Amino acid sequence: MVHGGDIYTDGIFKGQDLLDFSSNINPLGVPEGFKNNIAEALNNVTRYPDIKYRELLKNLSNYTGTVEENFVLGNGAAEIIDLVISNFKSILIVVPSFVEYEINAKKWGCRIEYSKLLPNMDFDYEDIQNKLTEVEAVIIGNPNNPNGNIIDKNKFESIIEFCEAEGKTIIIDEAFIEFTGSIKNSFIDKIEHNKCTFIIRAITKFFAMPGVRFGYGISSNEGLLNSIREKQNPWNINCFAELAVKYCLKDKEYIDKSLNWIEAERKFFMGEISKISCIDRIFNSFSNFILCRLKNIDENKLYKCCLEKGIIIRKASNFRGLDNSYVRFAIKDRVSNERLIKVLKGIEVINNEFR
């Protein structure tokens, strides 16, 4: 399994009502701002979108505080990740991380170097800077997937200065940045004065809209932005994505409710999971998921036990640097979280060998 959320593979889940803890989507669902204005998109289905996406860019600019010229638009963050990586012959990937980074780098024939997270799942800033001398770019998650840690901006400053001076590129994947609850955790403030930074974002996770397929890149590096645009097909953003950007990014009620939910549930969820005896360690997370190291049970056994109770969890062994003693849990609403916790406690009771 490469991605979480694949409930269709081999047809084994057909007809089952499953609770999916492998997919990191906001459990509050689609914002009302989108649903209440869906007729506007339906009216636009019969005509082509504005090929220059002027209104969409204006809405993104208002949301991020970044000038419109600094954006490149994608059919999901996946398109942006793919095309920005295509510009480099060598790249440093901080691992474990989102598997698409490596898949795309290999697809474009990049020479890959790796910087491994420290045992506590923090970034090894010294190792990143040392290895940057051998590559053209680095890609790193903020928060990082699968562990949810964020970049220490003070420790990362020397890396930015080095890359700016040496003409290297820092690709920062901020697909989960809204879940951290603070704009200060983003590197968007570095865009204007640092051409080396390229930020990737999407509406997939925080706004619970993976099916709409909208992501975007932000950079002041005009050459890099134009190189990506030249590789794209026209009209790559559909009218429903335009509508989502128009209404969801300014749905303050939804945003505030989401931030209150994640702050409360992250604290509750991490506290309860840490009490489960088959969990050896949980790693601090600033996102809507947590990475756990298991003891006396492996990911396959735990996955099977949870699946028997109608719950899917994310096995983590396909993340480079992790083995079958790691799993990742999404953080959901209180009722769903309590259901998973009850199942995990039940596994301990039934399987004494795991206690």
Image (cartoon, rainbow, N blue to C red):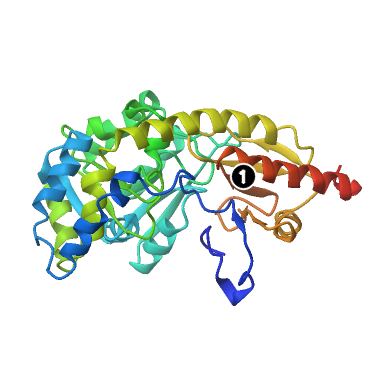
Residue, far bottom: 10
Image quadrant in which the C terminus is located = top right
Which percent across, then down, holds residue 85?
30, 57
Q: Residue at x 68, y 45 (%)?
A: 340
Nearer to us in this view, 229 or 344: 344
Is there any visible trace of residue 129 in the rendered image?
no
Looking at the picture, which amino acid does disc 1 mark?
Answer: Ser
Q: Answer left or right for 123 relative to 224.
A: right
Seen in the picture, residue 96 relative to 52 is either above or below; the reply is above
Residue 308's image quarter?
Answer: bottom right
Q: Which residue is mark 1?
A: 336
Farthest-out residue, top: 154
Quadrant assignment for the N terminus: bottom right
Residue 53 placement (x, y as % from top left): 12, 55
Residue at 41% over, 28% down:
152
Q: Position of residue 166 (x, y in %)?
A: 23, 40
Q: Is residue 139 visible?
A: yes
Nearer to us in this view, 87 or 333: 333
Query: Would you identify the image quadrant in which residue 127 lies?
Result: top left
Question: Does residue 247 sit above or below 266 in this rendering?
Answer: below
Mark count: 1
Using residue 232 as the reference point, say whether residue 293 is left or right of it. Answer: right
